Image (cartoon, helix red, strand yellow):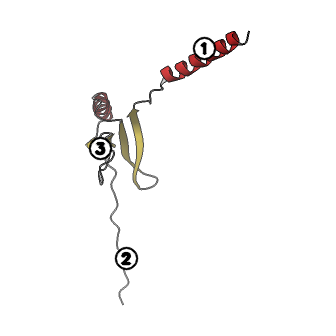
Amino acid sequence: MQIGFPRQLKTMTAPAHAEYTIYAYNRFHNNALGYNRWQRVTTIHDSEEALTQAQNLFQSHQYEKVEIKKKAFDDKKGQHVASTYRVFESRPKKDYLVMISVILLAFIAGGLFYLIHI
């Protein structure tokens, strides 16, 4: 029986820079079966360039939502950790016209009711 040192495990080396991956949510093919609405657009190592590209992609109005994920090496955990770096999304527009119309109609109905019963 041979006794020796345990086999060394391969260790992950920390990358020099964080990695920024841009994902875009496509709203146009909602009912297509098997269609993944999230698309990975690109991976960049420069945060400013990632922000610029994501903002340009969002402003093109082709996507409802654009996210940047940051992937970096965590020395304490000894592994890569991904987190959401920035999100670009449009806020749902409230339909104030309908609300104002309903309130106005209620005032008109109240006024007519008051005039009829005087």
Residue located farthest toward the bottom when viewing the structure as drawn? 1
Check disc 1 and report the residue beneath it.
108
Secondary element type, mark 2: loop
Q: Which residue is located at x 31 percent, y 33 percent? A: 54
Kind of residue at badge 2: Phe
Q: Earlier in the sequence, mark 1 or mark 2?
A: 2
**Which residue is located at x 29 percent, y 44 percent?**
29
Badge 3, how many Cα within 10 Å: few under 14, some, many 20+? few
Which residue extends farthest right? 118
Disc assigned to residue 29: 3
Q: Which residue is mark 2?
A: 5
Gap in Å between the C-alphas at discs 2 and 3?
57 Å
Q: Is residue 99 left or right of residue 111?
A: left
Q: Considering depth in this image, is 87 or 9 the residue closer to the camera?
A: 87
Please provide percent x and percent y for residue 1. 36, 90
Circles 1 and 3, Cβ within 8 Å, touching? The answer is: no
Task: Tell which circle, 2 or 3, labels the residue nearer the N-terminal end.
Answer: 2
Q: Is residue 84 left or right of residue 118?
A: left
Q: Is residue 109 above or below residue 19?
A: above
SS at circle 1: helix
Q: Is residue 31 above or below residue 100?
A: below
* Amino acid at circle 3: His
Observer-nearest of 118 and 77: 118
Q: Are marks 2 and 3 in contact (CB under 8 Å)?
A: no
Q: Residue at x 41, y 50 (%)?
A: 81
